Image: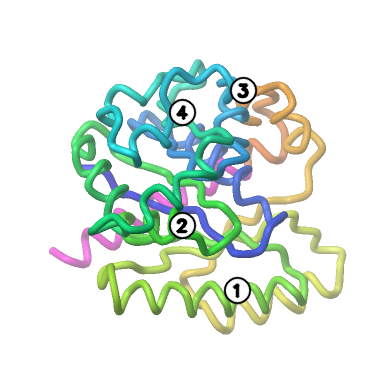
Amino acid sequence: MAQIIAIANQKGGVGKTTTAVNLAASLAVLKKRVLLVDIDSQGNATMGSGIQKNDLLYSITDVLLGEVPIETAIQKAEVGYKVLGANRELSGVELAIAEQEGREFILKNALNEIRNSFDYIIVDCAPSLSLITVNALAAVDSVIIPMQCEYYALEGLADLTQTIDRIQKALNPDLEIIGVLRTMYDARNALTRDVSAELEQFFGKKLYDTVIPRNVRLAEAPAHGLPVIYFEKSSKGAVAYLNLAAEMLKKSKVKKGSKV
């Protein structure tokens, strides 16, 4: 049964979609069955996986509106994992489902239908607290928070942790933050080091040892519709995301062992 993970941050520009795409690709390289779910109407995770968002026959929109089964809307990318894509049509879904009973659990119910077909389901959230994002947080087991080590990122992090607390109490009591990921990391910067130290103090073991550096190839890969590991596998960005996937798998294994 798949572990369902949201990549979320209410602040934009922190490497959220980059993390969703490259973590999905890295897990697939490590022989895991992976589904990437794009719930951002910009469709960047879809495009970054080599799928043209405007050519989608079916998308997450059709699933949320109940127009097609989720299996019908999932398609195989050429980069080792499957994708439930998104495009601009998603921006109108919120109004369409606003009065629907159980509207917060539409995505959860859909994902439960295919959960046994995957090892990991990665959900790329939009940088806003919309009804669609609430659907994601109600559906997932856990959250990974990517963030830059800068002052304003700490403010956004406080907002997100409060949101997760509210979702836990109201909709998903088992929801947890499994990791905080430092992105666009530059150890030469004093502020980066200071914020990183604060994160270590606050999150402890939930702060990933792996950091994602600023990397030209990582920035270029989306324009080619490829995760960085398929664009240039020897790049620092590709190595970092493979390390992240390995660290995540190791922590998951330790956690499962502690429950036995």
User: Relative to 99, does residue 240 appear above or below in the rendering?
Assistant: above
Name which of mark 1 and mark 2 comes first in the sequence. 2
- The residues tagged by marks 4 and 3 sit, at their Cα atoms, a distance apart of 10 Å
Between circles 1 and 2, the one closer to the viewer is: 2
In what element is the residue under mark 1? Answer: helix
Name which of mark 3 and mark 1 comes first in the sequence. 1
In what element is the residue under mark 3? Answer: helix
The image quarter in which residue 52 lies: top right
Name which of mark 4 and mark 3 comes first in the sequence. 4
Between circles 2 and 3, the one closer to the viewer is: 2
Q: Which residues are magenta?
A: 240-260
Which residue is found at the position 49% from the left and 20% from the top? 56
Residue 29: x %, y % from top left: 46, 28
The image quarter in which residue 191 lies: bottom right
Circle 3 residue: 230
Circle 1 residue: 157
Q: Report whether 232 appears left or right of 94.
A: right
Between circles 4 and 1, the one closer to the viewer is: 1
What residue type is disc 3 on? Answer: Tyr
- The residues tagged by marks 1 and 2 sit, at their Cα atoms, a distance apart of 16 Å
Instruction: Report if residue 143 lies within the magenta region.
Output: no
In what element is the residue under mark 2? Answer: helix
What residue type is disc 1 on? Answer: Leu
Circle 4 residue: 29
User: Relative to 163, does residue 210 appear above or below in the rendering?
Assistant: above
Residue sitting at the far left: 260
Classify 10 Å Cα crowding around label 3: few (below 14), some (14-19), many (20 and above): some
Circle 2 residue: 133
The numbered dot on residue 114 is none
